[in-house]
Amino acid sequence: MIIEQLDEPLPGSILPTLGGSWYTDPDVFALEQERIFSTQWMCVLRGDDVPGAGDYRLVQVGREQVVVSRNRRGEIRAFLNVCRHRGMRVCTEPAGTARKFQCGYHAWTYDLDGRLVAAPNLTRMPDVDRDAYGLRGVAVHEWMGYVWVCLADSPPSFTETVLGELVTRLGEAETFDAWQVADLRLGKRIAYDVHANWKLIIENFMECYHCATIHPELTEVIPEFADGWAAQTYVGRGAEFGEGVEGFTVDGSAGVAPLPLLGADQERRYFAVTIKPSVFVNMVPDHVVVHRMFPTAVDRTYVECDWLFLPEVVGAGTDVSGSVELFDRVNRQDFEACERTQPAMSSAAYADGGSLVPAEHHIETFHTWVRERLA
């Protein structure tokens, strides 16, 4: 039998991916930090992580370490963690509560709004503008119960970028309101240190061509995923639970109290949204799962995953382990696949990239988005 070698992808069936160097080249990653992670809205923590005045948490956004805190009025603030005098880190603990921020080198001191309020001999320097020499602020926005930051001097429109992703996936942003995400409470958080490029994780989340192979528990709950078509393939449609499946749990048993505002077309269904560059939102009838990714190296990504439930469910100490275990297994299965893919990105066999079959064609939109920002 003669096998014909094809120099070009089959028209309509196969689309090319990014080449392997996009996932391994430190220069590409440096450019992504400059032109993606430093210019886009990044979801960094849940508002409840800094509940009161003076509470703060350090987060890594691209190449910058950012202090996210609340001022005395309870308003969210964010600053680069760099003293304006000689550059020492102002905050050294990953989280805490402060009445003020003070550099440990020369004691330059800033209030909770970032304004310079004290320093040795400062009264002898009346020409020093205490606002101009305050901590460098970072744009902040609260939405979905989370704090979003943008390092850009002129951040892009939150409505057009972040909320625009909801329109792309759900048809209209208002559809998302039914899940009441801002009003939910954290039931569980799990962190993952994934030894893979961030784009591999994004691509994995966007498609379900792999689901029948590595997600046996997920395809038992949502049998249509075994056909390879992801929830994100369709606009405004959620993937339906299987016959006899009562809830989005590891064994398909009933979950917890359902979210009260969901419509009939949202019950017994799973919806998923990718918010570029680093957030996944998964919505099911009784809870929401939110992934936040923090790329730390060209081949390493830190991921925090939150399981959110109704306040009364969390407050009562309800057992949510069945719900958590399902997506935790999915995460570990996905991340193992990404980690086993990462080494091959350096192979000559992948120098020109791989292939996208029809069930994955929508990933090309993500690749185009990345190319345009790095061009």
Image (cartoon, grey):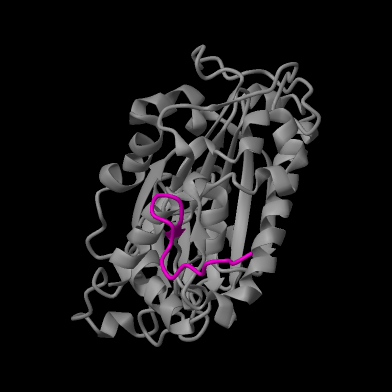
Visible residue check, residue 334: yes
Image quarter (top left, top right, bottom left or bottom right) of the N terminus: bottom right
Residue 363: x %, y % from top left: 44, 52
Image quarter (top left, top right, bottom left or bottom right) of the C terminus: bottom left
Q: Residue at x 42, y 48 (%)?
A: 362
Visible residue check, residue 113: no
**Magenta stretch encompasses residue 6:** yes
**Magenta stretch encompasses residue 68:** no
Which quadrant holds residue 229?
top right
Give the extent of the magenta segment: 1-15
Residue 5: x %, y % from top left: 51, 70
> Among all residues in the image, which is located at the extreme front?
1
Q: Residue at x 31, y 48 (%)?
A: 161
Q: Is residue 151 above or below residue 74?
A: below
Q: Residue at x 73, y 23 (%)?
A: 255
On the rendered structure, is 20 left or right of 321? Answer: left
